[in-house]
Image (tube, helix red, strand yellow):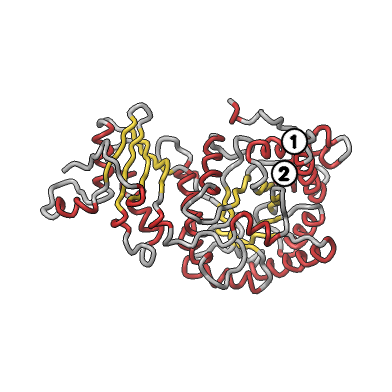
Amino acid sequence: MSFLALGKKVDPEDYIICKYFIDSDLTLEDAAGKLAEEESTGTWTEVPTEKKIHEFLGAKVIDIDKQEKIATVAFPNEEFSNFDEIGGIPAILSVIAGNLFGLEAIRNVRLIDVFFPKEIVRGFKGPKFGIQGIRNYSGYKNQPFVGGTVKPKIGLKPQDYGDFVYEIGMAGLTSGKDDETLISQKFCPLEERVIKIAEKLDQVKEETGRTVLYSVNVTTRADKILEVADLALENGANMLMVDVIVTGFSAVRALAEDPGVKVPIHCHRAMHAAFTRNSKHGIHMKVISKLVRLAGGDLLHIGTFGIGKMHAPPIENIECQKALTEDMHGLKDVLPIASGGLHPGSVEALINIAGIDIQIQAGGGVAGHPWGLSAGAKALRQAVDATLAGISLPEYAKEHKELAAALEYWGYVEPGQSNIYK
């Protein structure tokens, strides 16, 4: 039985269409056929009922690009029927990214893109806020969000988090966040931490009139996610954070679709590189980006466009940004977060590539300023202000000592120095 339908036109509204890079000793057609067989109606031997079922549920290999080693496979919507009530994203992933990675006949395979038809997308509510909704919620218009991450990652006390929020808020940053490894350890229980943070958020609001958002990490086991979120919200959290890969897309969806959760959901991607980093095997980060959008995340870390410490070709970050912001059958967009090794000297280059509909997130690049946390936050804010005004950072630093110290300490990334231009 053949799973090849090369040259056959299919209605994209009737299928989930996936693109795979495939590396195999078999011909690309045969390897793609094996993949389609494994992920739909086939098996390794003949089964009497298979042919009849294959007619309406079998996946179809509809295109082959031999030069790029890319096969396009269409999975019929019927394979996912009723998934919006039972199954959801886990059911989708079990098909489009399931056993195929272990097939003996395929040496390497990477899911590089997925296209969802309207029928599938309408089963999801998507983000509650989207970029404009976050702007309306926070009051920040026509600028990137500028965030600080508490460092060191773990070990500080609840009061330290409150003090951090106050300092970065008074210095002009829009946002703060827990790091991905802090949840509710004994040295810093979640409830106590949120109380201290909320007190300082209120204080900044009273003294400046500005709202500072703070993402509280509620990553936990699936059956506790709503309970932990409620605890954070009851004590004043104005944003929640979830480590989406380790917790699961369904946990994010549970939060996003809960009527009691009326704050944006910030998705951290901890562990993603275990399967997104290899250019020949695994899953492209833009696929994860689309799934987070389906699940209802409002913000997602996507990388630093070749400027920071996190590995990824800059073009992949751009593709993720597009996946989060381009039309997706009416779902709201998601705010991309650039994080990992950023500092004031990288801001101008980053905004030149990514624009202002992003959140610039710096941890060590704020807390590690030679003059301390407040100076680091001011330097980051000054770098953003300079870039928005069209003034180069070295020029702006002549009148802003905190930025000058940051540039001397960490250096200056000139627009055009990123790997995107190589």
Inter-mark Cα distance, 2 to 1: 8 Å
User: Quick one: label 2, few (<14), some, or many (20+) residues within 10 Å?
Assistant: many
| Residue 158: quadrant of the picture | bottom right
Place of residue 130 in the rendered image (x, y in percent of width and height, measured from the top left): 59, 56
Q: Quadrant of the C terminus?
A: top right
In the rendered image, residue 368, in percent from the top left (x then y), is placed at 75, 45
Q: Which mark is residue 36?
A: none
Q: Secondary structure at mark 2?
A: helix
Q: Quadrant of residue 196?
A: bottom right
Please state, as top left, top right, bottom left or bottom right, where the N terminus lies in the image: top left
Q: How many marks?
A: 2
Mark 2 and 1 residues: CB-CB less than 8 Å, in contact? Answer: yes
**Is residue 286 left or right of 232 when viewed as pictured?**
left
Name the kind of residue labelled 1 in the image: Trp
- Per the image, label 1 sits on a secondary structure element best described as helix
Please identify the residue farthest to the right as the structure is shown.
399
Is 126 on the left-hand or right-hand side of 18?
right
Identify residue type, mark 2. Gly
Which disc number belongs to residue 365?
2
Instruction: Pick the residue in front: 155 or 350.
Output: 350
Residue drawn at the location 51% of the way across and 70% of the way down: 224
- Image height check: is 268 above or below 26? below
Q: Is residue 273 left or right of residue 374?
A: left
Q: Residue at x 63, y 66 (%)?
A: 186
Q: Earlier in the sequence, mark 2 or mark 1?
A: 2
Who's the residue at 54% across and 37% down the image?
A: 312
Instruction: Check the image and name the residue furthest to the left.
Output: 48
Residue 410 is labelled as 1
**Mark 1 Cα-neighbour bin, 10 Å: few <14, some 14–19, many ≥20:** some
Residue 89 position in % (x across, y down): 41, 58
